[in-house]
Amino acid sequence: MTDTPTTPPSSESAIDRSRFRRPLVVGLVTVVLISTVVGVVAPEVYRYATFRTTHSITEDAFIEAPLIHVAPQLVTGRLVTFRVEENDRVVAGEVIASIDPTPFKDQLAMAEAKLGIARAELKRQQVGLAKVRKEVPLTISLAEQTYRMALAEQEKAEEGLAFTQEEVAGNIAASAAIVAVARTNHALATSDSRRFTSLAEQEAVPSRRMEEANTAAEATQSELDAALAKQRMAKAGTRQIAVAEKNLTLAEAAVKKAALDVAIAETGWETVAELEQMVVLREEAVRDAEAAVMAARHTLAHTEVRAPRRGVIVHKAKHTGDEAPPGLPIATLLDPDALHVIANLEETRLAGVNPGNRCSLEIAALDTVLRGRVLWINRATGAEFSLLPRDVVAGEFTKVVQRVPVRIEIERDEHWDALRAGMSVRVTIAHGPGDPEWVKETEAARLAERGEPEIIASHHEGTKKTKKTVVR
């Protein structure tokens, strides 16, 4: 029979005490650990919770810059030169490409030739107008002078006719009276001659007395013949009246012709008016030709495609030899000085975010943190610009938190040149009332840099109505 070894009483007591102390130590250690964790973590948790309630954070943010698509205007043709490459810097107005100008130079030459013809025709019309303006008054003056002379001749002819008529009538009357006296004298002398001849045959009177009576009869016969001759001459004066009447008729015809000549000469003013109208039309033709030349020059100038503003060429869509129609971009320009951040902030995190609030920007590609400020909060969510808009007419609806674009201006520092459009950013926006004055100054500076009228707009979230002030 083997004896079973037994544990001394003192060893059993030590084991019991060890079993009692172990839970106590574990508990104490646990309490210490929990106290330590609470003492260390709780402030951090508090600070984190406080930070999250006073800041809005999103990782849906990217660096952006305006992309300007440079395209030909007004002209289409083959690119003969492309003077820039991707990543080249350009300034506003710099020629980046040229379209074959040959056909447009031909159009300009044709327009200039037409302008020369129009100006020559205008000069010819102006010279003709000046000449007619001088000739018409002289022609009218000469015609009026001729008319006055014709009137004077007519008056003279009328006076001559009246005088001739009066003279002829007087001569006829006088000759008739003389003939009557001569007839009476001749009849008396003839009677005496017969009587004295009869008495002389009877020897009642001397023959001398008979001879005297016969002589007197012959003399009265001669006087009668002379009176009759004068009467015939007086009657012949009526032909002078006919001549005077003819002269008057000719004078009257000359007056009518002179009056017609005056009227015709006065129509020269109508010719002046017509020539003035022709000059106006030629002036319009010259203006049209000048406009055509300006348009041709403008079109020719557009064969040189220029950068609309300074920036960097980030993409070439065309190359030398390609056809470049108007409106189709041949290159894309980015302004590196206009870099900013667009943060698509959840609508539930907009509370406390206002224009002018400060931000921290963690640039993933650079492993650095930049500073910035909120410039504006967009008036529409990104969903409003979706190609497939929401349609809940069917009754099916799933609530999705929308995101509102927030523009953040980046403060320049030594990392600015390393920024690239499209880089991802983690944005932290501090809550606050904002800084409207800073927003106005920043907007004004941006617009002044672009050479545009200053339009200051309030983008504050609480503002229901946008206020705009235009400063010219």
Image (cartoon, helix red, strand yellow):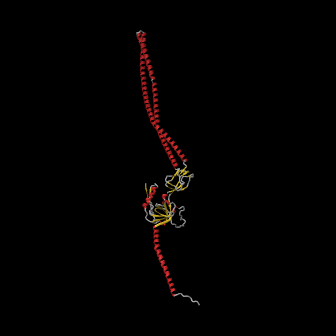
The residue lying toward the viewer, choosing from 293 and 330, is 330
Residue at 48%, 78% (x, y): give it: 29
| Quadrant placement of the C terminus | bottom left
| Quadrant placement of the N terminus | bottom right
The residue lying toward the viewer, choosing from 248 and 181, is 248
Residue 8's place in the image compared with 251, above or below, is below
Residue 308's place in the image compared with 264, above or below, is below
Q: Position of residue 101 (x, y in %)?
A: 54, 48
Judged left or right of residue 83, residue 191 is: left
Q: Position of residue 317 (x, y in %)?
A: 55, 55
Q: Quadrant of residue 2?
A: bottom right
Residue 261 appears in the rendering: yes
Residue 228's place in the image compared with 458, above or below, is above
- Number of labelled discs? 0
Q: Position of residue 314 (x, y in %)?
A: 53, 57
Residue 267 appears in the rendering: no
Residue 120's place in the image compared with 304, above or below, is above
Q: Position of residue 340 (x, y in %)?
A: 48, 60
Q: Residue furthest bottom?
A: 1
